Image: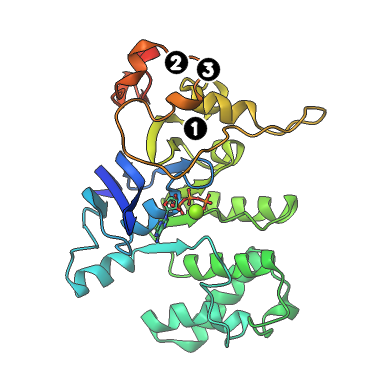
Amino acid sequence: MNAAQAKNLSVFFSKGKEVTWALCGINFVLPLGGSLALIGESGSGKTTLLRTLLGLVAPSEGEALLFDTDLSSAEAAKRRSVRRRCGYIAQDPYGSLPPTLSVEDAVAEVWQLVHGSTEEAKEKATSLLEELNIEREMFKSSLRNGLSGGQRQRVAIARALVLEPELLLADEPTSMQDASTRWDVLEVLKRRIKRGMALLFVTHDLLLAKVITERGLVLFQGNPCEEGPSKAIIENPMHPYTEALASALPRLGKPLKAAVRRRGAPKKEGGCPFLPFCPKSFDKCVTSPPFEDISLGRKVACWHFL
Ligand SMILES: Nc1ncnc2c1ncn2[C@@H]1O[C@H](COP(=O)(O)OP(=O)(O)OP(=O)(O)O)[C@@H](O)[C@H]1O
Ligand SMILES: [Mg+2]
């Protein structure tokens, strides 16, 4: 059994005659206890991929599986039992928290709904909140006001972890943290990974992917570009898009630049999707490159390597 898997997964959204392909032919396997980063710029389909795995968006083609189950078509009881094995940190910590509860109750509620015991729920919630560096004085604060964005995000992380999930789907979970609280969050996640939790980690930040995950999958406008060990992808990128992402990493003394200037919504057409932006394109790139193993554990969708 795998923790998560996509098989030839495509998802499109349509609005009138306009069709946006958010995901085009995604394949990956995340084994139990493994960790995979989904890397890409804004609009590359990362959130859609998590939402499709969770059964919140239906696949247009192919399959999205959690624990070998397609949640978009599973019966309610099966869906509940699979969801209970998963934690989900949504990208927006404002929309995903119950505004009327206190910090402590928002975390304890999740435990209580499953296990019942109020005392144990409070203990679990407080120790997790402390681990995430939320000050004790904040525990009784209302989520409606009095919390910073970073604090809210850490409360959302505590809610996702309190049931000790076998798989965590984390959508940019450190986007609102400063350098020190980001480190706290990463340490909390690393401890869970060590204990056997699988992690699907969405990020646009290559360096974060390298710190926290074993493997990475790079997406460009919903298309898979490159997959392999996170360290290898970042230190030795092969696909021209991954190269562009790596060279756009901010460094002191270096002027900032965008990895790619996007033009319009993603479409599903023939040819390499990166062709309009690629400095290395040649004749063959007008046909779509397959996403294939080019060496052990490394895949690249680029004719230069096939
Ligand atoms: N519900 C929707 N209806 C229509 N289009 C959508 C919907 N959700 C996503 N899209 C489109 O699908 C594409 C992928 O969006 P998605 O939110 O998955 O990207 P993302 O990689 O998570 O971006 P970000 O880094 O900004 O969060 C975008 O072009 C987006 O506009
Ligand atoms: Mg997103």
| Residue count near mark 1 (Cα–Cα under 10 Å), binned few <14, some 14–19, many ≥20 | many
Q: The residue under label 2 is which amino acid type?
A: Ser
Report the residue marked by disc 3.
279
Q: The residue under label 3 is which amino acid type?
A: Pro
Residue nearer the viewer, 34 or 263: 263
| Residue count near mark 3 (Cα–Cα under 10 Å), binned few <14, some 14–19, many ≥20 | few
CA gap, disc 2 and disc 1: 25 Å
Left or right of residue 247: residue 265: left
Residue 71 horizontal/vertical position (percent): 24, 62
Residue 152 horizontal/vertical position (percent): 63, 70
Q: The residue under label 1 is which amino acid type?
A: Ser
Left or right of residue 50: residue 133: right
Left or right of residue 284: residue 179: right
- State whether label 1 is within 8 Å of ligand 1: no
| Residue count near mark 2 (Cα–Cα under 10 Å), binned few <14, some 14–19, many ≥20 | some
Q: Which mark is residue 145?
A: none
Report the residue marked by disc 2.
281
Sequence-wise, the earlier of marks 1 and 3 is 1
* Residue at disc 2, secondary structure: loop
Classify residue 25 by image quadrant.
Answer: top left
| Label 3 with label 2: CB-CB less than 8 Å | yes
